[in-house]
Image (cartoon, rainbow, N blue to C red):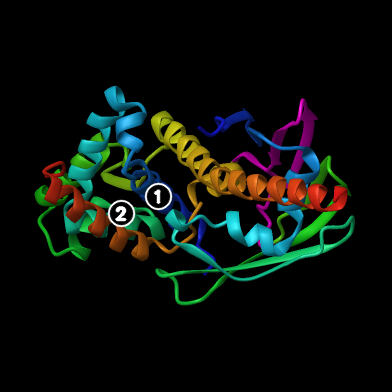
């Protein structure tokens, strides 16, 4: 139940994407600049191998060679997948000597905006329900007041 | 027509949420302090989360424990903490102790002309804690989120949105 920090990092990306595609969200918010990014992100994540790579990097950083071995793929094939993930910001790579190490990428500003908006929607939905209770309690108080005056 | 809700990140560690309610402060306060009322609004249906139990002793020094279930999780999730300060009809301060990253939350109710301005202030122990908290609004392991993602992608594909 308690996620590791790295798994949480990954959860952040997926969570923000999932929330961003909630009905109504795309229509109402940031449609102009959020959409291309989302489309690219979904394209990047629509491939099972690339999701596997992210899951693997969520546990620990890994070199392209290690990933190619793990997913039984040529180095060239793995480099292509990493390229797609790197362009969409899911992964960053760093070269030290002859080894290119992959890790989960930096958070994006649009994602923070999406988090804040999702959080706002959560509270807004809660408060809409709370409105109903406020109306109900007001009505009860009025009725009670009338009974008292009788 | 409901009043707008705003959320603003005031600093690296702070979030502030505001909303006005069309009723006096004592009524809004009541909805925040009686468990049978809390359960009616804290987990709206669209969230997919339901209360298993709700204990809330809303007095200074009192404790609370909310237990939720969600279809995606086998085990229920518990959220708990203490009320650090409770001033009837005006202010509630509580801790979130289910993890070391939990916020200190202060909610204030200010009545004006029969309406109540609510300000909810969350102070997180660190920048990372705040970012994790927002991102993990529905906590879950990565694999479960991948399953959800598959569903979302399938839905989008059927609308012709996703590749």
Q: Identify whether A74 is placed above or below B130.
A: below
Position of B143 compared to B160: left or right? right
Whether residue A20 is in magenta: the answer is: no
Name the residue at the bottom extreme: B74
Q: Chain of mark 1?
A: A
Position of B88 compared to A36: left or right? right
Which residue does the image show at 14% across and 64% down from the upper left? A72
Estimate the x, y position of residue B83 in percent, counting from the top left.
Answer: 82, 55
Position of A7 compared to B61: left or right? left
Residues at circles 1 and 2 in contact by the CB criterion of under 8 Å = no
**Residue tagged 2:** A54
Estimate the x, y position of residue A89 in percent, counting from the top left.
Answer: 31, 37
Which residue does the image show at 28% across and 22% down from the upper left? A32
Q: Identify whether B86 is placed above or below A1.
A: above
**Residue tagged 1:** A15
Of badges 1 and 2, nearer the viewer stands 1
Q: Nearer the viewer, residue A10 or B14?
A: B14
Whether residue B103 is in magenta: the answer is: yes
Which residue does the image show at 38% across and 46% down from the upper left? A19
The local crowd at label 2, few if under 14, some if 14 to 19, many if 20 or more residues have their Cα within 10 Å, is many
Element under disc 2: helix
Element under disc 1: helix
Q: Nearer the viewer, residue B40 or B16?
A: B40
Position of A77 compared to A11: left or right? left
Name the residue at the top extreme: A32
Sequence-wise first label, 1 or 2: 1
In the picture, the quarter occupied by the C terminus of chain B is top left
Estimate the x, y position of residue A68 in percent, counting from the top left.
Answer: 18, 58
Query: Which residues make up the magenta segment?
Result: B98-127
The local crowd at label 1, few if under 14, some if 14 to 19, many if 20 or more residues have their Cα within 10 Å, is many
């Amino acid at each position: 139940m308690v996620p590791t920090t790295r798994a949480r990092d990954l959860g952040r990306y997926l969570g923000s994407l999932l929330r961003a595609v909630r009905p109504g969200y795309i229509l109402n918010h940031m449609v102009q600049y959020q959409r291309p990014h989302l489309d690219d992100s979904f394209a990047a994540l629509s491939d099972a191998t690339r999701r596997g790579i992210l899951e693997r990097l969520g546990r620990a950083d890994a070199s392209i060679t290690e990933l190619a071995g793990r997913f039984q793929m040529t180095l060239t094939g793995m480099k292509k997948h990493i390229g797609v993930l790197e362009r969409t910001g899911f992964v960053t790579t760093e070269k030290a000597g002859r080894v290119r190490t992959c890790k989960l990428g930096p958070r994006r500003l649009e994602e923070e905006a999406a988090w804040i908006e999702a959080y706002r929607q959560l509270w807004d939905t809660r408060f809409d329900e709370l409105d109903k209770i406020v109306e109900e309690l007001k009505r009860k108080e009025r009725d009670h007041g009338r009974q008292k005056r009788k | 027509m409901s009043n707008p809700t705003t959320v603003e990140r005031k600093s690296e560690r702070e979030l502030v949420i505001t909303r006005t309610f069309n009723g006096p402060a004592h009524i809004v306060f009541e909805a925040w302090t009686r468990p049978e009322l809390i359960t009616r609004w804290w987990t709206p249906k669209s969230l997919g989360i339901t209360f298993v139990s709700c204990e809330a002793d809303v007095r200074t020094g009192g404790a609370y424990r909310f237990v939720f279930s969600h279809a995606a999780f086998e085990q229920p999730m518990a959220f708990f903490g203490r009320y650090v300060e409770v001033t009837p009809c005006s202010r509630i301060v509580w801790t979130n102790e289910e993890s070391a990253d939990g916020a200190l939350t202060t909610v204030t109710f200010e009545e004006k002309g029969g309406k109540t301005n609510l300000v909810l202030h969350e102070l997180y122990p660190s920048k990372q804690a705040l970012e994790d908290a927002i991102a993990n609004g529905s906590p879950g392991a990565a694999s479960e989120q991948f399953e959800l993602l598959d569903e979302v992608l399938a839905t989008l594909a059927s609308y012709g949105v996703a590749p």
